[in-house]
Image: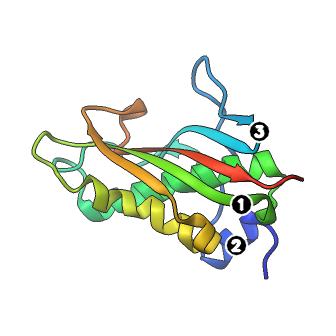
Amino acid sequence: MTRTISGRVAELGLALEAAAAPAANYVSCVQEGNLLYISGQISRKDGKAAYLGRLGDQISDVDGVEAARLSALGILSQIAAATGDRLDRVARVVRLGVFVASTPDFNRQSAVANGASDLMVDVFGDAGRHARSAVGVAALPQGVAVEVEAVVALRQA
């Protein structure tokens, strides 16, 4: 069995990018006790913002799911950076918050958010099952369609 987060992601045919640096006056992660709080990660591909626009307008549901998955890869990059890329340090993905830039009449935010949720389960198994909020918003940083934040419970090193 793979012992690294990046290795498990590679088994799924995906790759982690370097953990994104904060874009303003905040930090990417804060560990308090055994909880790791991860700031919102936008959908990025090749280091650049990806899937620009709103669901129900420029972005299809299928692309929205992919944007959520890319945002979740950003979460995984932050977890890997905080744990030395150790899969065994993750006890549980506790919660995801998924923000979907969408038109006022779009109501499938939770279906879009499954792109992030499914990836957490694919990587961590039952420990990837989590509580979640999926909300529609008017706009997100850099014009992306999806942003994901997380709370993760860690085991001692």
Q: Residue at x 59, y 50 (%)?
A: 75
Q: Circles 3 and 1: CB distance less than 8 Å?
A: no
- Pick whichever of labels 2 and 1 is earlier in the sequence: 2
Residue pointed to by mark 3: 33
Above or below residue 60? Residue 102 is above
- Mark 2 residue crowding within 10 angstroms, few (<14) / some (14–19) / many (20+): some
Residue pointed to by mark 2: 8
Q: Nearer the viewer, residue 52 or 95?
A: 95
- Looking at the picture, how far across and down is residue 45, in whole percent? 52, 52
Q: Is residue 84 left or right of residue 70?
A: right
- Mark 3 residue crowding within 10 angstroms, few (<14) / some (14–19) / many (20+): few
Depth check, mark 2 against mark 1: the one in front is: 1
Name the colouring of the figure: rainbow
Q: Residue at x 80, y 65 (%)?
A: 88
Which amino acid type corresponds to the residue marked 2 in the rendered image?
Arg
Residue pointed to by mark 1: 91
- Looking at the picture, how far across and down is residue 27, in whole percent? 66, 27
